[in-house]
Image: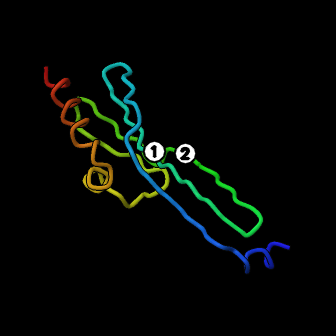
Amino acid sequence: DYAAGAAHCVGRAVMIRQYAGSAINVAGVTLIPIEQLRIRSDEQPDAYWIHAIQEAIAVIICDENGLRVINIETPELSIEEFIRKVPELESLLAEIRSSLST
């Protein structure tokens, strides 16, 4: 019985990490997937389990027209908010911008 088991739960942990995936270049357009990894673990007196989900939550499009973001999961987030949440994204975008200007 799940409800009975949940009442005796010893511990739970959830880790969520967002990061920039590998950039993809197609016909002068660079696509950067923003991915999210969720890891959850649960522990009960007689069991322990862990599971993980990795999924794309947005795609940043870089081309001669500038930067655009297509949000999959969080439509309200701007590129600036993704840069704040995904630290490595700022340097990756700077590198792509410099390659587009050459």
SS label for mark 2 = strand
On-image quarter of the N terminus: bottom right
Count of marks placed on residues: 2
91 w.r.t. 41: above or below: above
- At horizontal 29% and vertical 57% (from top left) the residue drawn is 81
Residue at mark 2 to residue at mark 1: CA–CA distance: 7 Å
Direction from residue 82 to residue 41 in the image, left or right: right
Which of the numbered marks, if any, corresponds to residue 35? 1
Badge 1 density bin: few <14, some 14–19, many ≥20, Cα 10 Å: some
Query: Can you give x and y, in whole percent of width and height, for residue 49 in the image?
Result: 69, 56
- Name which residue type carries label 2: Gln
Query: Can you give x and y, in whole percent of width and height, for residue 60 in the image?
Result: 35, 40
SS label for mark 1 = strand
CB under 8 Å between callouts 2 and 1? yes
Q: Earlier in the sequence, mark 2 or mark 1?
A: 1
Could you say which is closer to the camera, residue 20 or residue 41? Answer: 41
Which residue extends farthest front? 45
Could you say which is closer to the camera, residue 85 or residue 70? Answer: 85
- Name which residue type carries label 1: Glu
Residue at mark 2: 54
Could you say which is closer to the camera, residue 62 or residue 22? Answer: 22
Query: Can you give x and y, in whole percent of width and height, for residue 33 in the image?
Result: 42, 38
- At horizontal 56% and vertical 54% (from top left) the residue drawn is 39
21 w.r.t. 28: above or below: below
Which of the numbered marks, if any, corresponds to residue 76? none
Query: Can you give x and y, in whole percent of width and height, for residue 71 in the image?
Result: 43, 50
Badge 2 density bin: few <14, some 14–19, many ≥20, Cα 10 Å: few
- At horizontal 69% and vertical 74% (from top left) the residue drawn is 9
- At horizontal 38% and vertical 61% (from top left) the residue drawn is 76
Could you say which is closer to the camera, residue 89 or residue 80? Answer: 89
On-image quarter of the C terminus: top left
**Residue 42 appears in which quarter of the rendering?**
bottom right
